[in-house]
Image (cartoon, rainbow, N blue to C red):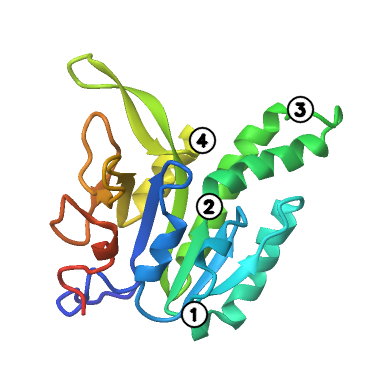
Amino acid sequence: MEIKSLKDTSRTEQWRVCLYGKPGVGKTSSAKYLKGKTLILALDNSAKVLGGTDIDVIEFNRQQPGQEINDFIKEVPSFIGGYQNLIVDNISSFEKDWFVEQARNSKSGIRNELQDYSGYTNYFARLISAIYRLPVNILVTAWESQRPITTANGQQFNQYAPAVRDNVRDLFMGLTDIVGRMIAKPDSGERGVILEGDDGTFAKNRLDDRKGCKIEELFNFEDGD
């Protein structure tokens, strides 16, 4: 086993960030604020909003999500060295498409079978682990949903969180440095990100001490360049 000192290790080197929010709030557009060359894996084919920018995109065949993502994992090591940032946009859409594909291949041809749900837990664990091993900064986007939670004193709340299945969320959140909920002010349209969680919103930030910020400042980490 190799032992190394963390004295000279930066918390913000090759960060992993999840940004979630309502459709249309501007998650994909946040790519404009990244520094360095950026590649988008467009799982929901919404990258057209970035037209005219110096950003590369991998279009995704949503009819065959399993094969498409497997091909990406196999081929990405050969070209990722030309980029500083990878955006995986949007895992909520991918999850829905994956289950649609499994239902289409089932005996009935229209509904999912029981093993699909447990199978997706293992599948997603391997998938996100493989993506997170890539030597680049990684931004993952997701839609938002509300999940019921119960506090230690027995109070119940509906909490905003990334829209992925409950049994993969904890693993995903544990591997991710920042989980932020993106919101827009209804009066001005100004976009911001909540970085500190509470009973109503799942969020966390283990890269610096910010509790929230404007979207254009999200990637300006305090101990980074």
**Residue at the limit of the structure toward the top, as seen here:** 154
Res. 54 mark? 1
The residues tagged by marks 2 and 1 sit, at their Cα atoms, a distance apart of: 20 Å
What residue sits right under mark 4 in the picture? Answer: 165
User: In the image, 100: left or right of 151?
Assistant: right
Q: Give the label, 3 or 2, closer to the camera.
A: 2
- First in sequence: mark 4 vs mark 1: 1
Using the image, determine if residue 215 lies above or below residue 77: above
Picture quadrant of residue 223:
bottom left
- First in sequence: mark 4 vs mark 3: 3
The residues tagged by marks 3 and 1 sit, at their Cα atoms, a distance apart of: 41 Å
- First in sequence: mark 2 vs mark 1: 1
Q: Residue at x 42, y 66 (%)?
A: 31
Answer whether labels 3 and 1 touch (C-beta < 8 Å): no
Res. 90 mark? 2
Q: Give the label, 3 or 1, closer to the camera.
A: 1
Res. 70 mark? none
The residues tagged by marks 3 and 2 sit, at their Cα atoms, a distance apart of: 23 Å
Q: Residue at x 60, y 74 (%)?
A: 76
The residues tagged by marks 4 and 3 sit, at their Cα atoms, a distance apart of: 17 Å
Q: Give the label, 4 or 2, closer to the camera.
A: 2
- First in sequence: mark 3 vs mark 2: 2
Answer whether labels 2 and 1 touch (C-beta < 8 Å): no
Kindly identify the amino acid type of the residue bearing the numbered disc 2.
Asn
